[in-house]
Structures are given as structure tokens and as C-alpha cells.
Image (cartoon, rainbow, N blue to C red):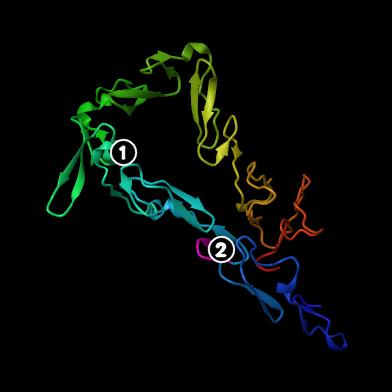
Amino acid sequence: MFQGWTHGDRGSCNKDIDECASKHPVCSLAPPVQCINTPGSFQCGACPQGYTGNGLYCVDIDECLVNNGGCSMTPYVECTNTLGYRRCGSCPPGWVGDDGTSCRQGVTGCAVNNGGCHPLATCAQVSDTVRSRIQCTCPPGMGGTGVGLMGCDYGRSSDPCIASPCGVSGTCVRMGDGQYVCVCRPGTTGKNCEQSLSTSGASCEPNPCQNGGLCHVTPSLGVSCVCRDGYTGPSCSEQTQSCGGNIVQSNGTIRNSPNIYSARSAVSCVWTLDSGDEGSILKLNFSANFHLYSKLGDCIDNHVEVRRGGNT
């Protein structure tokens, strides 16, 4: 019997199997994708708008990653990604708008929330021949449009880092209003990285941090590692994994991130495994029990599925 066919008349394999009629749907369930039966096989429709994938699996697109998802940038309105779309927050006080994609200064003037200007900016309501509008002006020593919480910034004349207070042992970071913080290099500490830690016995030589991690020495913690994205653990030796991904190696262990999945959440964790050796046999060992939400004795809502290639 060939895949996609079953016994028909006189025992021959000429009866098509309708994969779409199976109680274990072959196409995406979250979001639902149409299944189209074909002779000996099946096809999945396209993923709906707001998702990407091949129809077997669909992954939500985070619209907020590009141009703030179309939500207002001036003033800034928070964009929140949702399944299949995104949601814009409300325009800030002093501004009006329908859906957060565009905000205009309201008629309340400067009395509410400084007219939508930066808290340190001067708000003035000016009128021209067409309409009244709000004008925001940053205080002396600061530059910018003056609009919104990020509208004013300290210029170089007020930059406390110009004098290099951290010296050669650290990096100066402006904190606003003439304040700064020194990010000290390994082996030094103090407000201006002026204290040496070489006498404490803790050292970053050789560097104990793996995978490009940064080594730091502090009096309270001793040697510690700051890991790059994608790695974790005391020495940055463990690779962090999320819900799905591509793995090309001969062996390994898959662990989904904690709390990535709950009984009724619409999550599809898709892992693509490739040993790198064509024709090799892939052996899967499941080291833990699966606690699946069961509905009427089947596993339509929750299930673990293994495929060889696209449809097999």
C-alpha cells in the first residue's frame, strides 16, 4: 500500500485517503489553515494575514519590530504585538487620536501634561491664521524637538563624560541632568573605576566566560560572567532555546523555555533537526512525561508530532 492510498476495489491500492478528514488535522490549527485533499496527498492553504509559514505551521509576525508597528512615533505610543496583528496604545495626555496610529495635540493647551512636551521643556500655545497649536522648546543646554518624553536631550556642552571621569579603566555613560555612571573594566571598581581588585585573589585571567561572555570581578560576587544573547549559565556555556528553531548537529538536547506553553495557549513549537549526514538515522529519546490537555479522549488540541521532511 502506497502512502496516501488504501485498498479499494478488488484489493488494489486505488482508493484515495482523505487526510483532511482525519481527526488529527494535518494543517495548522493555531491559526486554522484550510486543508485541501488531493489524489494520494493533500495541500495546506496559506497562513492568514499576520502570520508566516508553509500552512503546516504558521508563526505570528511581530509587527511592532518595524516602524513601531504603524503606531505613532511623535509622540511615542507603545505598540503591543498580538496573535495575527498588533495593538497601539492610547495617545498620551494632551494628545488626541482615534487608534494610537496618529496623535495630534488637543485643545486643552499646556495645562494638561505640559501640552505633551518634555517635562523640562517650555510649553506655549501659539496661533496662526489656520489653527492653534502647541510649541515645545527645550531648556538651555538641551536639544531636540521638545515633544514627548524623549523630546529633549543634553547636548555636548552639558555632557559630564567629556572630562573622561572614568579614565582608561571604564566607559562613561550619561544619565541626564549632568549625572553619569562608569562601567568598569574587569579588575577595577569604584565610582570612577579608580579601585583595583587585583589584591582580592579573583581574576579574569584566563577568562572563565565562554561563547564571548564578558568577565567581571566585584568585591561581593567575585568573578561573574555577563553572557551574550543566546547563552546562559554561570560560565555562559549553556545555549538558551525558545519555542522552536533549527538544529544542525549529530546529537543534542532540546529544552523549551520555561512557561512557554500552557494547556490552552495557541503555541506551536516547531524544531527542525538535521544531523548533517545525509541518509543517517535520527533517534529521538523523550526523557520526560508529557502532560497534555485531553478533550474527549483524543489529543487534537495538544499533541507531539514527528515528520520526515514536509508531509511524511
Looking at the picture, tell me which residue is in the foreground, 60 or 253: 60
Name the image quarter holding the N terminus.
Answer: bottom right
Residue 188's place in the image compared with 103, above or below, is above
Local packing at callout 1 (Cα closer than 10 Å; few below 14, some 14-19, many 20+) is some
Question: Can you tell which quarter of the image residue 281 is in?
Answer: bottom right
Q: Which residues are magenta?
A: 48-54
Q: Which residue is mark 2?
A: 53
Taking the magenta stretch, the answer to whether it contains residue 227 is no
Closest to the camera, between mark 2 and mark 1, is 1
Local packing at callout 2 (Cα closer than 10 Å; few below 14, some 14-19, many 20+) is some
Q: Is residue 100 left or right of residue 53?
A: left
* Residue found at x 33% / y 24%: 180
Q: Which residue is mark 1?
A: 150
Question: Can you tell which quarter of the image residue 222 is in?
Answer: top right
Please identify the residue farthest to the left as the structure is shown: 129
Name the image quarter holding the C terminus.
Answer: bottom right
* Residue found at x 77% / y 54%: 294
Please identify the residue farthest to the right as the structure is shown: 10
Residue 55's place in the image compared with 196, above or below, is below
